[in-house]
Amino acid sequence: MNKTVLISGGASGIGKELTLEFSKNKYNIIVLYNKSIQNLDSIEKECRSNESEILFIKCCLSNIYEIEQAVNKSLKKFKNIDVLINNAGISKMGLITDHSLNDIDEIININLKGSIVLTQNILKNMIKNKSGNIINISSIWGMTGSSCEVLYSTTKAGIIGFTKALAKEVGLSNIRVNCIAPGYIDTDMNKEIDCQTIKYFKKNTPLGVIGQPSDISNLAIFLASNKSKFITGQIISPNGGFLI
């Protein structure tokens, strides 16, 4: 029987690559999406070609009711969720003094609180089964901080702390929790970054290249597999050596 993975923000960027890679590995896929609807048809077609079942659920992670309903729909369809990937997130660039209270609430609710609430709801199923795997997507900025991305960095640092604490709490239930903290990855979210900044990243990256979404999805497949069965509570940063 195929395992089931739920991926928040699984319709674009790194999330889309995660969806397609897990499909190639014969997982049943649950994709939570909010605004990224342009890729749904092509994602579904590719998943079907991989003989992988897929369920799309529209869900805003700042809405606790929508999260609860999404988990209920998922468990009604597939009975169990074996892997949870907390990937959905937004970014807000600018000086911290220029951000409104609404900006602060929005990014914390989606990037941090939403991931925690989604995990809470899915953990009930994993604990009952004494089995599960949670992969949180943070960022290199959650490890080092980034000027003009203070809110984003703060939420991603929170995800790192969440990973470490949760791994200690649920380990005896045979549930592993790890975190991927990517460096600069070539995604739509980063398209607004200017050429000079991209050159800076390449120059200061020992491997001399920009990361690709597949660099993250390949790591996630490993963390979800039995090949990593003794790995939990770890923060792994694919960043080409930008941070060593």
Image (cartoon, grey):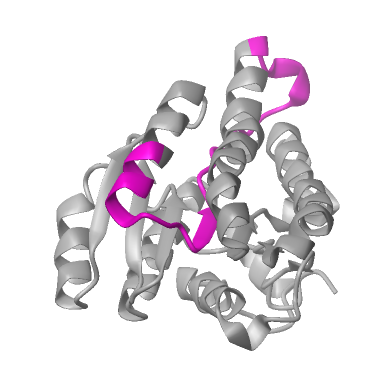
Q: Position of residue 44 (x, y in %)?
A: 18, 60
Number of marks present in the image shown = 0
Span colored in magenta: 72-101
Q: Quadrant of the C terminus?
A: bottom right
Q: Position of residue 168 (x, y in %)?
A: 84, 57
Q: Quadrant of the N terminus?
A: bottom left
Asked if residue 1 lies left or right of residue 211, the reply is left
* Residue in the image at 64% along x and 31% along y: 113
Residue 75 covered by magenta stretch: yes
Check the image and report above or below for 169 versus 201. above
Query: Quadrant of residue 92 in the image?
Result: top right
Foreground residue among 175 and 188 = 175
Q: Position of residue 135 (x, y in %)?
A: 61, 61
Foreground residue among 26 and 12 = 26
Residue 6 covered by magenta stretch: no
Direction front: furthest residue? 128
Query: Quadrant of residue 98 in the image?
Result: top right
Foreground residue among 150 and 8 = 8
Residue 63 shows up from this direction: no
Asked if residue 64 lies left or right of residue 139, the reply is left
* Residue in the image at 67% along x and 11% along y: 101
* Residue in the image at 67% along x and 53% along y: 138
